[in-house]
Image: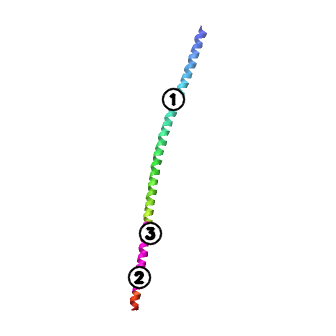
Amino acid sequence: MSDTIEDLQKQIKAQNAIIRGYEKVLKLNEKELANADEMIKIYESIIAYSSSELKNAQETMNASHIVANMSREELIGALGKIKNLEDENKKLREESLKLNNL
């Protein structure tokens, strides 16, 4: 009978050791999940920041295109004015020559 009690006590100790092992594994899993949750939050923050940076970069590129187009249009306009002024100067020289030849 004492063998049976001793055997039962050994079994209880073994089961308690198994339970403590499972509790340790459970605590480790909980810590791992907490770490994973923190990692997810960090990645979400990185994604939000990257998205904001991408949006800013796109807005900057759009603004650059607008400025480039404006500059192009202004340049074309300025070249057109120069051509008109050169044509006017040519006509004025021709008229001046006509008057000098009279």
For label 2, the residue is 91
Residue positioned 39% across, 86% down in the render: 96
Give the position of the N terminus as an image quadrant. top right
Along the viewing direction, whichever of 7 and 45 lies nearer the viewer: 45
14 sits left or right of 76 in the view:
right
Q: Residue furthest top?
A: 1
Q: Residues within 10 Å of mark 1 (few under 14, many from 20)?
A: few
Q: Residue at x 41, y 73 (%)?
A: 81
Q: Secondary structure at mark 2?
A: helix
Q: Is residue 53 above or below residue 11?
A: below
Q: Residue at x 45, y 66 (%)?
A: 72
Residue 37 marker? none
Which label was assigned to residue 27?
A: 1
The local secondary structure at tag 3 comes to helix
The image shows residue 26 at horizontal and vertical percentages of: 52, 28
Question: Where is 24 relative to 50, above or below?
Answer: above
Answer with mark 3 or mark 2, whichever residue precedes in sequence.
3
Quadrant of residue 99 within the rendered picture: bottom left
Relative side of 34 to 2, left or right: left
Which residue is label 3 attached to? Answer: 76
Q: Main secondary structure of the magenta part?
A: helix
Task: Residue at 42%, 69% (x, y): give it.
Answer: 77
Q: Mark 2 or mark 1: which comes first in sequence?
A: 1
Q: Quadrant of the C terminus?
A: bottom left
Q: CA distance from mark 2 to mark 1?
A: 95 Å
Residue type highlighted by circle 2:
Lys
